[in-house]
Image (cartoon, grey):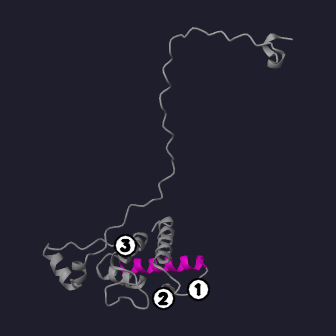
């Protein structure tokens, strides 16, 4: 039996390990960064800020005249995915409501926020209609078979649920290139 593999109960101990003299230290390997993911990022840039209260009060005709004089710059209309993200921003800034497009205190429902953004020049009627189709498609995915503005008025809805549905519709539009 080899003395290296003996039992301590037998009273025989293994010979002590001999120390090897330390040689020159090797440099530590350079820290490597993990490889970048070649897939494109799915997180879009944030949408432009919604119109302010002052911008809300200026009628379209006056805005157009001011733009002709160089005193006003009309916003660039947004694609449906950005329009839906901006609807969320409008509802978060001014408040969300049910049963009416605009409440006396300035809150809006989904349709009211879309109307507001269209009147302020942030979306064209064609792109707004595309956004509505994405909202309806998202509701259909969730198993809801009613118009989005009727769904908005359900007493069981909360702002968080509305925000999640609009966000999912915006993601759907973005994945389709709109």
- Which residue is identified by label 2? 153
Q: Residue at x 16, y 81 (%)?
A: 65
Q: Could you tell me which secondary element the residue under label 3 belongs to?
A: helix
Q: Earlier in the sequence, mark 2 or mark 1?
A: 1
Q: Could you tell me which secondary element the residue under label 1 belongs to?
A: loop
Q: Which mark is residue 89?
A: 3
Q: Residue at x 41, y 79 (%)?
A: 128
Mark in the foreground, 3 or 1: 3
Q: Earlier in the sequence, mark 2 or mark 3?
A: 3
* Percent of width and height locating residue 59: 22, 85
Q: Which mark is residue 145?
A: 1
Please state, as top left, top right, bottom left or bottom right, where the C terminus lies in the image. Answer: bottom left
Give 114 or 175, whichever is nearer the viewer.
Answer: 114
The magenta span reads 124-142
Bin the neighbour count of mark 3 within 10 Å (Cα to Cα): few under 14, some 14-19, many 20 and up: many
Q: Residue at x 50, y 65 (%)?
A: 175
Q: Residue at x 50, y 67 (%)?
A: 176
* Percent of width and height locating residue 95: 36, 80
- The answer to whether residue 165 is left or right of residue 15 is left
Q: Which mark is residue 88?
A: none
Mark in the foreground, 2 or 1: 2
Distance between mark 3 and mark 1 Cα atoms: 26 Å
Give 171 or 151, whichever is nearer the viewer.
Answer: 151
Q: Earlier in the sequence, mark 3 or mark 1?
A: 3
């Amino acid at each position: 039996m080899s003395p290296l593999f003996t039992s301590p109960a037998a009273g025989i101990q293994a010979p002590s390990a001999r120390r090897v003299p330390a040689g020159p230290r090797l440099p530590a390997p350079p820290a490597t960064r993990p490889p970048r993911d070649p897939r494109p990022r799915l997180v879009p840039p944030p949408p432009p800020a919604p119109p302010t209260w002052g911008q809300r009060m200026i009628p379209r005709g006056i805005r157009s005249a001011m733009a002709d004089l160089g005193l006003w710059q009309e916003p660039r209309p947004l694609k449906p995915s950005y329009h839906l993200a901006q609807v969320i921003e409008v509802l978060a800034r001014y408040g969300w409501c049910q049963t009416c497009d605009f409440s006396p205190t300035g809150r809006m429902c989904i349709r009211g926020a879309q109307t507001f953004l269209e009147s302020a020049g942030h979306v064209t009627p064609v792109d707004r209609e595309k956004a509505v189709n994405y909202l309806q498609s998202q509701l259909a995915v969730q198993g809801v078979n009613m118009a989005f503005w009727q769904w908005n008025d359900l007493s069981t809805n909360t702002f968080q649920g509305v925000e999640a549905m609009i966000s999912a519709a915006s993601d759907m539009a973005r994945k389709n290139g709109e």
